[in-house]
Amino acid sequence: MRPVDEEREHQRLYVALTRRATLFGALALIALIISAVNFLALIHAFWQPMGVFNMPLYLLFAVVALWAAVNFLRTRRRALEYRDHPERFLDE
């Protein structure tokens, strides 16, 4: 492979990993917003007479969204690490 082609491939990989990291960052932000809204709905359910029945559902959605946000952030961190230090992963 010529050096020019190798440089283009490296640049293409860099851009693709940057886009993927941006996507996972946006998904993490959305999941954090969903989690916060569900925690607020959980707090608001205390003032509703029938809100007690909705509390487990709000709590479930809040915890699952928080778990998803953490996983998206971990995946984003791995993509950025691979983008910035590809030589570490080529050895494996």
Image (cartoon, rainbow, N blue to C red):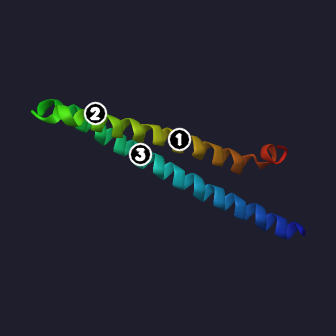
Quarter of the rendering containing residue 77: top right
Query: Would residue 45 be visible to someone looking at this image?
Result: no
Secondary structure, mark 1, is helix
Amino acid type shown at disc 3: Ala
Residue behind mark 2: 56
Q: Horizontally, is 17 left or right of 26 in the view?
A: right
Amino acid type shown at disc 1: Asn
Residue 71 disc label: 1
Amino acid type shown at disc 2: Pro
Residue behind mark 3: 31
Alpha carbon separation for disc pair 1 and 2: 22 Å
Q: Earlier in the sequence, mark 3 or mark 2?
A: 3
**76 or 50: nearer the eye?**
50
The picture places residue 66, in percent across and down from the top left corner, at: 42, 38
Secondary structure, mark 2, is helix
The picture places residue 16, in percent across and down from the top left corner, at: 65, 61
Query: Would residue 56 be visible to someone looking at this image?
Result: yes
Alpha carbon separation for disc pair 1 and 3: 10 Å
